[in-house]
Image: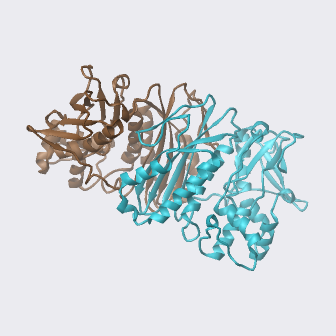
Chain colours: A cyan, B brown
Amino acid sequence: MRLNERGELSLLKEIQKRFKGRAKDIATGIGDDCAVVIPRKEKLLLTTDMMVEGVHFDFAFTTHFQIGFKIISVNVSDIFAMGGTPRFVLLDIAAPEDTDEDSLDSLFEGMEKAFRHYHITLVGGDLSASESFVVSATLIGYAKKPVLRSGARPGDGIYITGNLGDSACGLELLKRIKRPVSLETGEKIHTPLGWSTMEPLLRRHLLTEVKKPGKLAGIATAMIDVSDGLFIDLYRLCEESRVGARICMKQLPLSIQMRKAASFLGREPDVFATSGGEDYELLFTAPPRRRVNAACIGEITDSERVIVERDGSERPFSLEGYQHWH
Amino acid sequence: MRLNERGELSLLKEIQKRFKGRAKDIATGIGDDCAVVIPRKEKLLLTTDMMVEGVHFDFAFTTHFQIGFKIISVNVSDIFAMGGTPRFVLLDIAAPEDTDEDSLDSLFEGMEKAFRHYHITLVGGDLSASESFVVSATLIGYAKKPVLRSGARPGDGIYITGNLGDSACGLELLKRIKRPVSLETGEKIHTPLGWSTMEPLLRRHLLTEVKKPGKLAGIATAMIDVSDGLFIDLYRLCEESRVGARICMKQLPLSIQMRKAASFLGREPDVFATSGGEDYELLFTAPPRRRVNAACIGEITDSERVIVERDGSERPFSLEGYQHWH
């Protein structure tokens, strides 16, 4: 049965049934004019992110399950980047009328998996027909002491929680494969590169699991998630903190798989790592000599410029060429 | 300058500048990974609504200003329908790349007018290119004691806060006019029906201002806003409360302008009033003999059916024919 045959009410009931999760802090869930929740005595974090077919993704390269999982992950990433805990989500889905039932179910399954993974609960949403597929999520979370982008001070170390460039490299591999890969159902692909090299890169791009900040929330002086690329996101952090930065290229954590795949693709690993985006690792600063469980990649300076050091030479990073409309 | 020439960063900065409203309960507004707000010691209300070009509206009949105002009003209506106070809003806008600057400015002006009117503050959002225009808003509000749909009891009176059918009648007029009417800039139209008749009906549809519940929040046993039409929204309230209702058609408040315009259009005023939708009046129930500043249109029963009484005869309302996918 296709979307336009189900009718709005029956679809809403199905979603209500699927996501009927009860929790102590939810007085009224999906089904009334609003959800009613009992907030904690902490600060509230509010964020929203949207994904548009043909702009952020293409069903020629990704499954509905993966889009469902990803729209939640990218929003959770914003909460984690404040050192917070995600809790409630509201979803708006606009889908073409001829979207089939399996695709919708797959989308909901991807979302459901993310809800369980991040311990969040769906409390509201809206559904509509549309020409192309648009999904937007608003996430509400908590933090006792949110970590802003603006707290970096000269002398702070700059850290990253994990490997850079895997996601962008995974996307490039996907463009060669030219069709969706259902990692969620255990699909494997035979290529000269080898599945053990490809799988983590594809997974990083298609089924991104973002990392909890954990103790970082109490250590970091400033934090941001790497969504658009290391350089541009570092630039944003520096701009908000009114500081500069010096990044040492050889300290960037790059996975063996990414190096291997980049070589296979004839691409530069450093470009994936610094400009690729969608890694959703946490980029943060911490006072010098503070012991931190993350890779140190540079230092905050008082120059108001981002300087990149490579093989003994230095060049400034400029924002030009980084503005993109997506 | 068109959307695709501006670049995402400059557009975000412009929005930040336009909506930079500071308030005591906002620790961090637009510009970080999340907004940080300090919640009141009340229950939180969460709601979201989306409007899609070609499904919910058509720029052949409406201005960008009106869509900006309306996406906020429809969300505020959900908060009011819980007896609550709206406070923070997050916005996702997907617009075709060739959207011109005037249209975008007009959209933002409509939203800004609504923010001021309802005393709410924009704290986050996302922008994207897309094939067609999609705008979604998530609104966060408060209520000490939210009024649910489920509290109606047999014997309660059924009330409506204002005239029914004006919005649907306004839409029909608009379909005859066949172009947008810029009420926000004082545009007037000369027609045989007369502007003083048309204006309030068009305004109801194009620039809906939803009503604060005020004292109703402490009186109503159940409440819902009339978005899809009196009958279907009453049916929903009854279903959640597990009760029935008896509605007396002659008690429905219909405006003189709507009756006059319906006659001009050769349409039945009662159909606009009961099935038209988008009136965004509050439909609520209250204990018998409670003094209430609203029109009494019927009574809650224990039959679990919605009965409509007209000219001495009765007929049950059925949900069939009301399921629509939008």
Name the foreground residue: B52 vs B154.
B154
Name the foreground residue: A140 vs A101.
A101
Asked if residue B103 lies left or right of residue B17, the reply is left
The C terminus of chain A lies in quadrant: bottom right
Mark count: 0
* Res. A22 visible in picture: yes
The answer to which image quadrant residue B248 occupies is top left
Residue A47 spot, x, y in % from top left:
58, 44
* Res. A52 visible in picture: no
Residue A117 spot, x, y in % from top left:
64, 50
Residue most extreme to the front:
B303
Please determine whether, in this image, residue A130 is positioned above or below residue B77: below
The answer to which image quadrant residue A189 occupies is bottom right
Asked if residue B119 lies left or right of residue B247, the reply is right
Residue B145 spot, x, y in % from top left:
44, 26
The N terminus of chain A lies in quadrant: bottom left
Residue A16 spot, x, y in % from top left:
45, 48
What residue sits 56% from the left and 61% below the top? Answer: A65
Please determine whether, in this image, residue B133 is positioned above or below residue A102: above
Please determine whether, in this image, residue B40 is positioned above or below residue A281: above
What residue sits 25% from the left and 49% below the top? Answer: B171
Residue most extreme to the left:
B311
Name the foreground residue: A215 vs B116.
A215
